Image (cartoon, rainbow, N blue to C red):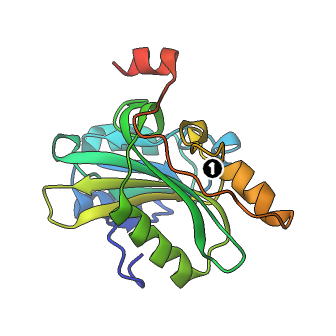
Amino acid sequence: CRLHGVATPRTFFPTTAAELAEAADELGYPLVLKSVDPFVRLVSRQIAATTLVRSRPELLEHATAWQEPFEMLAQEYLPSETSQDWILDGYCDGDADLVTAFTGIKVRSSPPFANAAALGLVEANPELVAITRDFCRRIGYCGILDLDWRLDASSGDGFRLVDFNPRVGAQFRLFEDDAGIDVVRAMHLDLSGRPIPLGAPIEGDRLLIEHHALAAR
C-alpha cells in the first residue's frame, strides 16, 4: 500500500513481547491485533479473530499466553465514531483487470468493531472501484478478492484499506447483479473461456446473519 500510494492504517509485525510493546507505544490505544495468516489461528491460537485492545494491561494479558515468535500484527485503530466500513468484492482476470466488482456498507460486524459482516447493504461506490482497479493493476493481482475499506473522516485520508483477502469473502453472497453473477460465477466463466454477462448491482440488497447480528447488537 505504501509503495503504490494506497492509504492504509499504520501496521507493525512484532514477533516478540518487546517489539509488541514498542508497536503499542507507537500506535497508542485502542489498537487492533490480527493473525498474519487466516490459517495460523487454527494451529497457534494466538489471535482467534481480529481483536480490539483498549489498554496496556489488556495487551499484556493477551501476550503472556503467547509463545515467541509471535504470528500476528498490530494495526492502528480508526475510530468507529468517525468512520464507515465498506466492503469490495471482485474478480480480476489474467490481465489483472477488475472485471467484476461489487461494493457495499458493512452496517454491523461480529464480533463488534471488526471481523465479518453481520449486516451488509449493497451500495454503489465508483470511487472505491476505481481505487481498487488501479491498485490491482499495479500489483498484478489475479483472482477473487475481498477487501475491507474504512472511510476515515477524522484523518482526511479518505478510504483506507484495512484488509486485502485474496479469496472468497464470508459475505460474498451479499453481492449478485441482475444478470445473476457473483464473484465465484464470474471466475468460473472466465476460467472456462466464456464471457461474463454484464449486469448491474442490485442496490439496497442486504445480507443479515441473524444470530451474529443479534449478538453484535
Res. 71 visible in picture:
no
Residue 76 in picture, x, y percent from top left: 30, 57
Q: Is residue 68 visible?
A: yes
Q: Residues within 10 Å of mark 1 (few under 14, many from 20)?
A: few
Instruction: Please tell me which residue is depicted at 70% across the width and 56% down the height of the picture.
Output: 186
The quarter of the rendered structure image containing the C terminus is: top left
Q: Position of residue 37 (x, y in %)?
A: 62, 55
- The amino acid type, in three-letter code, at marker 1 is Pro
The quadrant of the rendering that contains the N terminus is bottom left
User: Residue 103: horizontal and vertical position, in percent?
Assistant: 44, 51
In the image, residue 192 above or below residue 95: above
Residue occupying the far right of the picture: 192
Q: Residue at the spot x=63%, y=77% of the render?
A: 96
Residue at x 63%, y 49% (from the top left corner): 38
Looking at the image, residue 146 lies above or below residue 65: below
Residue 176 picture quarter: top right
Residue at (56, 43) in percent of width and height: 46
| Whole-percent x, y for residue 105 in the image | 37, 42
Left or right: residue 34 compared with residue 23: right
The residue where tag 1 is placed is: 38
* Vertical order, 64 against 163 (above or below): above
The quadrant where residue 60 appears: top left
